[in-house]
């Protein structure tokens, strides 16, 4: 797969192009270009290390939004078997931005719910750019209640810039749908693991984010508002989004330090979009580990710990 480079990656891509040209020209020509090739390879390795080890919060936001990152349905292919999608919220209709259904993880039946984006215009229109409507959140809760009824664990994949803010969503009460999910997910008696796989924006992310364990991919972000939205409010101009991303402390490392998330899942060098298979293996291993730990708790202990986990957020100690 040809990966589209981000702006800060273009110097690396240019060096890789030069290396490929040099190898093509020297192949079969008997030209002693080995030293020059080795020199460029060392330069590329050094540049990659410096760039990817020193990513700024804004650069991580850009990686989190990359259209070639694996989405929810990709993780269903790489981590799960026998996915059976369920449709409709039994009130209004279905929402393609929020696929949900039953699947198997290492032979164990579970429920999977997640935001789904698209990679081209047609798919993005179908998936509403990953911004779910009220019926998406109501469908998600309906399927999670089935998991609760049958004693199956729940996995959610968070990847949205935010819930859909259109007039229709407001008419069908998007705020109530999300708020209702927050309350009802707190009451579910089976283990819940949430994974932020890309963007974790605002209440749209939190609407399926009440979980016993919250995990984040290394280059994802999780925040109350997008950097552009924060910049528009505080600096009165979206061009300050990079400054906002730094001030908001929205990266996985920041949130782990504050106790908001439970584990950072590493990504391949350059981001998950460079190797879907490898990141799929990492996500699967993390899910298996955390679900195994949660299965050791009875429902009362599980719910109490979940309550304590979220209750302590924002706690101030003088």
Image (cartoon, rainbow, N blue to C red):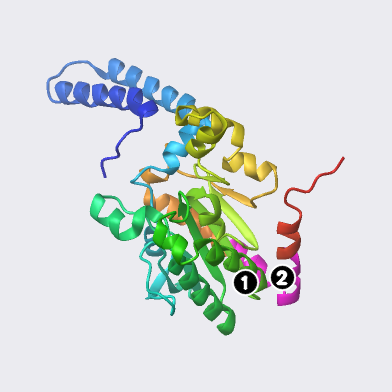
**Label whose residue precedes the other's in the sequence (1 or 2):** 1
Overall secondary structure of the magenta section: helix
Mark 1 surroundings: few (<14), some (14-19) or many (≥20) residues within 10 A:
some
Q: How many badges with numbers are in the image?
A: 2
Asked if residue 224 lies in the magenta stretch, the reply is no
Q: Residue at x 46, y 60 (%)?
A: 170
Outermost residue toward the bottom?
150
What residue is pinned by disc 2? Answer: 303
Check disc 1 and report its element: helix, strand or loop: helix
Of 191 and 232, which appears nearest the observer?
A: 232
Asked if residue 293 lies in the magenta stretch, the reply is yes
Of 45 and 9, which appears nearest the observer?
A: 9
Check disc 2 and report its element: helix, strand or loop: helix
Q: In the image, residue 100 lies at what x, y percent?
A: 43, 70
Q: Which residues are magenta?
A: 289-305
Q: Residue at x 53, y 66 (%)?
A: 177
Residue 69 vertical position relative to residue 40 in the rendered view, above or below = below
What residue is pinned by disc 1? Answer: 184
Of 30 and 280, which appears nearest the observer?
A: 280
> What's the mark number on residue 108?
none
Q: In the shown orientation, is residue 315 left or right of residue 10?
A: right
Instruction: Report whether residue 243 is seen.
Output: yes
User: In the picture, residue 18 is in which quadrant?
Assistant: top left
Distance from the alpha carbon under mark 1 to that under mark 2 = 12 Å
Q: Residue at x 15, y 21 (%)?
A: 25
Q: In the shown orientation, is residue 247 left or right of residue 96?
A: right
């Amino acid at each position: 797969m040809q990966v589209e480079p981000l702006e800060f990656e273009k110097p690396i891509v240019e060096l890789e192009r030069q290396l490929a040209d040099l190898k093509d020209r020297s192949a079969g020509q008997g030209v002693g270009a080995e030293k020059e090739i080795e020199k460029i390879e060392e330069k590329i390795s050094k540049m990659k290390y410096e760039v990817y080890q020193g990513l700024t919060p804004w650069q991580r936001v850009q990686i989190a939004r990359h259209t070639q990152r694996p989405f929810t349905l990709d993780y269903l292919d790489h981590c799960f078997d026998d996915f059976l999608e369920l449709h409709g919220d039994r009130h209004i209709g279905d929402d393609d931005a929020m696929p949900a259904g039953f699947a198997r993880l290492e032979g164990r039946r579970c429920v999977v719910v997640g935001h789904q984006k698209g990679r081209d215009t047609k798919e993005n229109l179908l998936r509403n750019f990953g911004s779910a409507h009220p019926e998406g959140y109501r469908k998600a809760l309906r399927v999670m209640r089935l998991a609760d009824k049958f004693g199956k664990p729940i996995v959610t994949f968070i990847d949205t810039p935010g819930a859909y803010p259109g007039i229709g969503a407001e008419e069908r009460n998007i705020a109530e749908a999300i708020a209702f999910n927050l309350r009802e997910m707190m009451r579910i008696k089976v283990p819940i693991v949430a994974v932020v796989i890309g963007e974790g924006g605002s209440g749209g992310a939190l609407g399926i984010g009440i979980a016993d364990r919250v995990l984040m991919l290394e280059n994802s972000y999780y925040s109350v508002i997008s950097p552009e939205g924060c910049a528009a409010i505080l600096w009165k101009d979206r061009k300050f989004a990079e400054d906002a991303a730094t001030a908001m402390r929205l990266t996985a490392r920041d949130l782990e330090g504050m106790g908001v998330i439970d584990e950072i899942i590493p990504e391949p060098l350059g981001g998950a979009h460079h190797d879907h298979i490898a990141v799929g293996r990492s996500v699967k291993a993390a899910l298996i580990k955390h679900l195994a730990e949660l299965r050791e708790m009875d429902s009362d202990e599980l719910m109490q710990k979940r309550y304590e986990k979220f209750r302590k957020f924002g706690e101030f100690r003088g």
